[in-house]
Image (cartoon, rainbow, N blue to C red):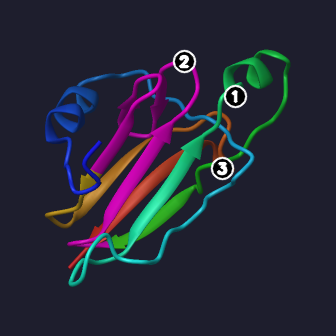
Amino acid sequence: MNRRAIIFTVLLATLALTTVGCFGSEREGKIETSPLSPGDETTYEYVVPFGTGNRLDGGEVIELMPSELDVKVGESIRIVNDDTRDYMIGPFFVTAGQTLAMRFTHPGVLEGVCVVGSGGRFVINVTE
């Protein structure tokens, strides 16, 4: 997948959903601070490893997403789902085997319930 792609249609579709969840990973809250290319801002990257759904089924508590993430307009989030299941991650829906990449273009707040993440919610605060 093109690292610079912004999946705007996925965001619009997921904002309409009412059931929101979260997922876990062994690489908890990895933040990639290097730009995608010269002149780009920070990208916050999270990975759902293969087998995460099975770990959740087994009752394991998995925390990947922070309860709150403060970003600036121009920065990005990238969520890689290496598992065989689809996941709701705050306001985002990431299908199995896919990557969601979104650059924040406007200030605002995006949020959703996160039953296995820190604090039970995932809130993204976007500022200028």
Image quadrant in which you'd find residue 103: bottom left
Please tell me whether mark 1 sits on a helix, a strand or a loop: helix
Q: Count all numbered tags in the image, as a single digit.
A: 3
Which residue is at the front of the view, 4 or 118? 4
Is 95 on the left-hand or right-hand side of 11? right
Percent position of residue 127, x then y = 26, 74
The residue that label 3 is drawn on is 119
Q: Distance between the Cα atoms at labels 3 and 1?
A: 19 Å
Q: Residue at x 29, y 54 (%)?
A: 3
Dot 1 alpha-carbon crowd within 10 angstroms: few under 14, some 14 to 19, many 20 or more: many
The residue that label 1 is drawn on is 52
Dot 2 alpha-carbon crowd within 10 angstroms: few under 14, some 14 to 19, many 20 or more: some
The residue that label 2 is drawn on is 85
Percent position of residue 29, x then y = 61, 58
Q: Amino acid at mark 2?
A: Arg
Q: Is residue 100 magenta?
A: yes
Q: Amino acid at mark 1?
A: Thr
First to last magenta residue range: 72-101
Percent position of residue 34, x then y = 43, 78
Is label 3 or label 1 in front? 1
Please tell me whether mark 3 sits on a helix, a strand or a loop: helix
